[in-house]
Structures are given as C-alpha cells and as structure tokens.
Image (cartoon, helix red, strand yellow):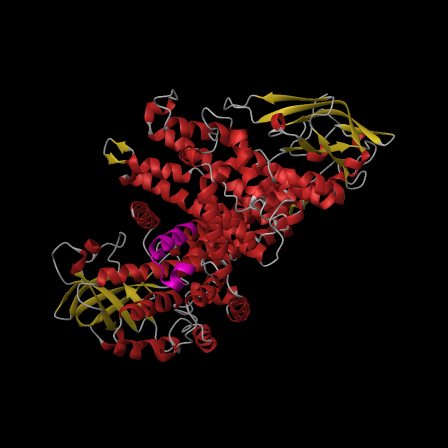
Amino acid sequence: MNFDDTPQEAAFRAEAKAWIGANAPKQYEEELRKSSLGRTALKNVNMLEVAKAWQKKKADAGWACLHWPKEYGGRGSSPIERVIWQQEEGPFGKLSGMFIIGHGMCGPTMMAFAGEEQKRKYLPPLAAGENVWCQLFSEPAGGSDVAGLRTRAEKKGDDWIINGQKIWTSGAHYSDYGILLTRTDPTVAKHKGLTMFFLDMKSPGVEVRPIKQASGQSDFNEVYFTDVVIPDSQRLGAVNDGWNVSLTTLMNERMSIGAGVSTGFPELFEFCSSLMLEDGPAIDDRGVRSKLANWAVKASGLKYTSMRAISALSKGDRPGPENSIGKLVAGSMIQDVAMYALDLQGAAGVLSGPEDAEVAGKFQAMLLRAPGTRVEGGTDEIMRNIIAERVLGLPGDIRVDKDVPFNKIPTKGRA
Amino acid sequence: MNFDFSDEQKQMRDEARKFLAEKCPPKAVRAVLDGNAPYDKELWKGLAEMGFLGIAIPEAFGGAGAGHLELCVIAEEMGRALAPVPFSSTVYLAAEALMIAGSDAQKQKWLPVIASGDAIGTLALFEGKGNPSPSAIKLSAVAGTLNGVKKPVPDGAIADFAIVAARTGSSGRDSDISLFLVDLKAGGVEVKSLTNIDPSRGQAELIFKNCKAEPLGAAGEGWGILTQVLDRAAVLLAFEQVGGSDRALEMGRDYALDRIAFGRPIGSFQAVKHLLADMYVSATLARSNCYYGAWALSTNASELPEAAAAARISATQAFQHCSKNNIQVHGGMGFTWEFDCHMYYRRANATALTLGSLSYWEDALIDHMRKRNAA
C-alpha cells in the first residue's frame, strides 16, 4: 500500500507537468480554479472554443484520451497515468466537461461495435475535440426505465428511418454526432426490440430544443426526429441487440472514475475558514466543526474509494457496480453542503446579485445544479438498486412488463 | 501507486478469518457476554500461537516483526468476529505505547510476554466523563508514587500492567502530563469491574493508593506520547469497526434473502434494498478512509493524525449505522437476546466511545485540516 510513483510513473508525471506548464491556457487558470459545480462557464469568452482549442493542442502532442489506443487518437496509457494526468492538469481539466460523454461513453461504444474503417474515420477527431458527441438514450417515457423508449427506427432499403423524441440530452445543441438507441421491434419484450445507431446531428429532420433548467442554464435538450435517415452502415451491433450495446455504454460511464466527483466540500471548508460569525470565526464553532468533519470524511472516503478502484483497474480488474457510490454520495452531499453554506450566511444567503454573488452565488449555483446530479446517469434510487442487486446480490425488482410485448404494455397509470 | 493490501496480506486475512470462524463463533462471544468468563482464554492462547498478538512487535522483542499493515488486516478480522479478548487494549494501546516510548528494559520485559499471550496490558487514561485532554487528568504522580482513580479502563480487571497518564505539574500546559508503567499484580492498585454496554469487553475502575510506578518516556512528554498512541489505536480500532460493519451488513443481507413476507423475500422490497445499499455505502467509505489510515500508520507519515481522525470518524459512523440497520432489517427478531444482532450493536456503540467520543475526533480532524491548509 503506497502512494509513491514508480520510476515510470514519476517520469510520466514530469513529462506531463512540463508539457502542461508550457502549453495550458494560463489566462483562464484563476477563473477555472474558482469555478464549481453549476458555475463552470467562462466569462466573456466562448467556453466551447477555449475547450476545443485546448483539446486539439493536447491531441496534437499525444495527450488526448489517454486511455484510448493510439490508432484511434489516444495514448494507450494505464489507468494510473490517467490519474496522474488529471492531477497535473488541475483546473484546466474542467475544460473537458463537454467532451466527457463523447470520450467516456460514445467513443468506447464505437470502439466495441463500429467497423474498423469507421473507427479510424470518427474516433481521432472525437479524441481531438474537433467533434463533440452526445448520447441519445432518455425519453419522456423512458428515464430510469431506459428500455421503455419509443423512438422508432424502420428499415427502408439500406437505410433506417427514425421518428420520435429524446430528452435530457446533454450538449446536443453543440454536438456533431450522437449515439442513438431506438425501437426496431415493438412486438417483442421491451429489452429485445432495441437497436443502436450513430448519426450526424446535422442530418435533415433532427431538431434540437434546449431545455431551460432550474438553474437558468441550458445544458440539456429535447431532440426531435422526423423521418431522419440513417444508413445501415451506421448501426452499432446487431438489429434488436441494442440493449446489450447500451450496457457497454453504461458500463463505460462507470469507468469514468478518477475524474473526481464534486462534493462542494473544499469550497465549504474554505468558506468556513474565512467566515466570521457573531461569536467568532465559523470554524471555531463546535456545531460547524461537527458538520465539516462529517462531510470531510465523506469526501475523503470517496477520494480513496476511487483510488482503490484505480488500483484494481491497473491490476486488470473490470470496473464494477461498486463504483456507483461516487455519484450517489456526492450528489446529495453537494446539495446539503450548499444549503448549509447558505444557512451560515443567514438572511443574506438568499442574495445572488453581482456584489453578493461571490460567496452566495457559488453555493446557489451548486444548490440549483445538484438535483440534476442526483438524477442524471441513473437516479439515487437506481444507484441503490444497482448496489443492492449487483453488489449485495439481492433479488431484482419485480418487473411486471418484463416478458410482455412492448406494444401490449399499459401506458397510463389511471384510466 | 498501489492503494491496496498485498497478496500476502490478503492471504493473512484469509487465514485469520478462517481461524476466527472456527475458534470464535458467536457462541464464544456469548459465553463472555453472558458473564461466564472475563475473556476467552482459549482464543487468546490461540491468537498468540498464530503469532497475531505480536504481529507488529519487532522480532528482537519476541514479535513477528511483520508490521502495521498486517496488524490492520488482523484487526479487521477481530472486529468482524467480535473477538471477546483484550486485543485492542493490549496490542493497540499498551504495546504501541511501549514501542513509542518504552525504555529498552521495559520493552524487553513486556513486549515478549504480550506477543506470547502471557501478559495483558491496558491504558489508564480516563477519569470519569469527558474526552481526552490534559486538564482532565487529575491522578497525581509525586516522586514516582501514584494517587487517584481511573475509569473506565478497558480490560482493566484482567490486565497485568497498565500505562497510566498522570499529572506531574501544575503549569496548565501539556507538559504537566507524564506516563507511568504500573505492574498491576504488584499491589497498590484496587481493581473493580464495572458493568458496561458491551460485556464482551470488560471495563474497570483502578484506584491507585500510594502506588509505586516507573516512568514511561521522559517526564512532561506524556501528552505527546498519548496523542500518538491514540492516533495509532484509532486506525487499528477503525479496522475493527470496518470488520464489524461488514459482518453486520452481511447478516442483514443474508436475513433479507431468507425471510419471506408478503410472499417474497424481504430483500426484494426496495425499502429494504435501499437500507442495505446505504449500509454498503457507509462501510465502503469507512474502509477507504481506513486504507489511507493504514498507509499513514505503516509509514509513520506526517498525515497520520489527520488520517487517523478521518478513519476513526468514518468507521465509527459506519459501524453504528450498519449495526443499527441490521437490527431494522431483522425486524422484531433483531432486538431479541437470542439473535446475534445486538452483539454488533453493543460493540459498535462501545467502540465509538473507547478512545474519546466522536466530537473529540471531529475537533481533532478539523484542527489538523486547518494546520495543513495553513501550511
């Protein structure tokens, strides 16, 4: 059990550090350092452009998508090298936010199911940030129950014709490509009639409508498909085997460990260290210290849990369902932390105008973004089911629609 | 970087688990809990034969000289089995104090008999209510003679010797405190057993009346040594707590799979599943904090005080959480004497207090974090 770099790891770290030192966009460092969940936009510049430029620079020098194979634009690095890179990249890593879905989920799915020619065509520009990808899974009728989706794909010659609607699609408004899960056979049980594709988001018939979130920002979208044509060559996996393909995608989502989940704790600790209460510094208050200590051990517990997972990965283990706990714990923690930070400010915690926003605004942004964290990529409840069923071996939930043909499943709770 | 135990250490864990499953089944814990014996002497002897008592004691002093990572591995299994033996008081508190501050002669005298299972040791720190602090130590030491009362003293009624925290000055500073080593069989100490929430581990009151004692470590350095001992014991006890958490979770899981209600295993109900999932989460976070503590302990890193506090808080919460919800999963059967759930619940709540309460460790954690941030 040790934290020391091996000589190889130390050499990698030194190389990464030197390159980042010489190439990172330093002018944004301070602003990125101060940004937190719900507040990662850069003022006065187009963050997408800055992010794309940094990603391209990394790709040209061989630092993009470290864990991907070299022939697809990656570096073929070990999981630990990936962590070292993240440590050294520091706040500049926040620029990668809009590539996470493409790099963490779409890319690996393409690698597993696309043809060789397509991989060589699409993956290097994805790695280099030239193209942004999104993942079109959720629907109004299929959120946690992903397999309940209704978007249809119908075969016509060598093409498929897509009609339907997706929702909660992160980044669709600036995405170039997407992976799309559709229903191809409504007469069989819901998991058995799905097929996966990838498509050009600029295809005729694709309409993206941003959703304004509770925070006021628009990170997610509704996406409508009207007679969208996708060539059969862009099918991923066999017809009606889309559920298995999507499981690969979702498993890779869990593999995005080490990326570090926001807990809000460093921000809260810093705030409590400087805040003066009536009786003196907040951090000297017994109640404040108790709260801080409880969150501190959650934050450190998450950190070391992910280090254990990385150690296991580097020994060749596959990422398991136990990695679900990061999002589960961090999601509700950041919500509680934000509420507490506002509470400590008393009546003034409610203000968010420019002059008062430096402290209150930061925690308000977290507060308004946190509910999303608890839902996206699987709700808290789904995460608990995953832990209970796949880690602890408890029985699966009773699913009354499991063996019913999709088109015979009731669609309304009350007549 | 490698944030895991080695294959050899894991093999040792398997050995310890197998040994304890055989020699320390729940009925062995009950024998002590029910008051049939002050501790399990057979088990104690067996642990000595396995080399577990001296696992972190250097070979020169009769131990196995393996190290603290190995001791962490054993501690987890001791906690899992609720071993009713004076392991934590003897090995984590007395032996660690001796290794940190003992003279060569003291080490030669006591460490080999700890390793062989022939001596039980403890730390006499508390004097009634309250958390560890120099001002709470009233027992006086004048010219090597102790007068005062210590309670609760873990395993004090069966201990052969005690490390005693005493006041040797009145300056109001930490340097007023010194440590002494007392042979409890030599007279001068009246020992009373105290009833406590977890009778599978005894607590006692020690009354010192003009008791002759030898200094342990330099005069005036007692508080510094004590905090080191407490930090080290915090990591080791945290491993016991994690072992107990895991076992309580397993018991709950197994019961939820077996027990049928409303025509299905209760583990198929989401409310029960989520209860168990949350137990897994707290046990996992605690385990990860403990691994960090184990690293800090085994390398004597400057991060040890912070890591120890984090492990202690996290593991205390996890064991309380898992043992209490294990009872909930068991329903009405869970709070009967005949089911084993209450033994974990007792141990969780007793262990939560043995090195000072949660608020003491919360305070310590925040102090260490502030110091680190200021540095």
* Quadrant housing residue B86: bottom left
From the viewer's perspective, is residue A162 above or below residue B37? above
Between residues A322 and B45, which one lies in front from this camera angle?
A: A322
Locate the C terminus of chain A and report the quarter of the image it occupies.
top right
Between residues B89 and B305, which one lies in front from this camera angle?
A: B305
Residue B284: x and y in percent read 51, 51
Between residues B88 and A10, which one lies in front from this camera angle?
A: A10
> Magenta region's main secondary structure?
helix
Residue B146: x and y in percent read 17, 68
Most extreme residue toward the right, as rendered? A157
Tell me what residue is drawn at x 60 percent, y 49 percent: A75
* Quadrant housing residue B59: bottom left
Tell me what residue is drawn at x 42 percent, y 63 percent: B200
* Quadrant housing residue A97: top right
Q: Is residue B307 magenta?
A: yes
From the viewer's perspective, is residue B96 above or below residue A23? below
From the viewer's perspective, is residue B65 above or below residue A405? below
Q: Which residues are magenta?
A: B295-314
From the viewer's perspective, is residue A27 above or below residue B314? above
Task: Give the left or right position of residue A350, taking residue A414 as reference.
Answer: left
- Decide if residue B189 is in sight here: yes
Q: Is residue A243 magenta?
A: no
